[in-house]
Amino acid sequence: QAQLEESGGGSVQAGGSLRLSCGVRRTPPYIYSRYCVGWFRQVPGTEREGVAAIKPWDNSTYYADSVKGRFTISQDNAKNTVYLQMNSLKPEDTAMYYCAADFSFYGPCPIASSNYHYWGQGTQVTVSS
């Protein structure tokens, strides 16, 4: 099992940057090599969209096409924290951002939200033009 808590959201002008943090508290038993953490976002009335994911075991990362080159997912194992650095923000990046974790992935981390079972409460990101 895992408990997650996001922080770092806020309001920024287009072209600006924000860094989101996701603190993850893992409860054994679990297999670390199958553990993934993802970032997702959702605008009211729309489906939740996968943004990025990371497999801490080998530090492999995965991105949605809409954020490649602008967003970077990373981890700090000592702090049990996963970050989402968001640069060159656009108004269309405005959404509630969630982090999620799961321990069932043998291969690459998916960025489809339906694959993740443990979720944080979300943090709002607003980008103004």
Image (spheres, helix red, strand yellow):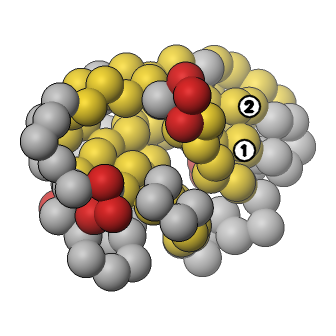
73 lies above or below 7: below
Q: Which residue is mark 1?
A: 86
Question: Residue 56 appears at what percent x and percent y?
Answer: 48, 54
Q: Position of residue 41 (x, y in %)?
A: 42, 46
Q: Are marks 2 and 1 in contact (CB under 8 Å)?
A: yes
Report the front residue among 41 and 45: 41
Q: Nearer the viewer, residue 45 or 38?
A: 38
Marks 2 and 1, Cα distance to the nearest angstrom? Answer: 5 Å
Quarter of the image for the N terminus: give it: top left
| 100 shown above or below 21 | below
Quadrant containing the C terminus is: top right
Mark 1 lies on a secondary structure that is strand
Query: Which residue in the structure is indicated by mark 2?
Result: 18
**What residue is at 78 percent from the left and 67 percent from the top?**
69
Horizontal side, residue 30 vs residue 56: left or right: left
Tell me where residue 77 appears, x and y as whole percent: 54, 36
Residue appearing at x 31%, y 54% in the figure: 32
SS at mark 2? strand
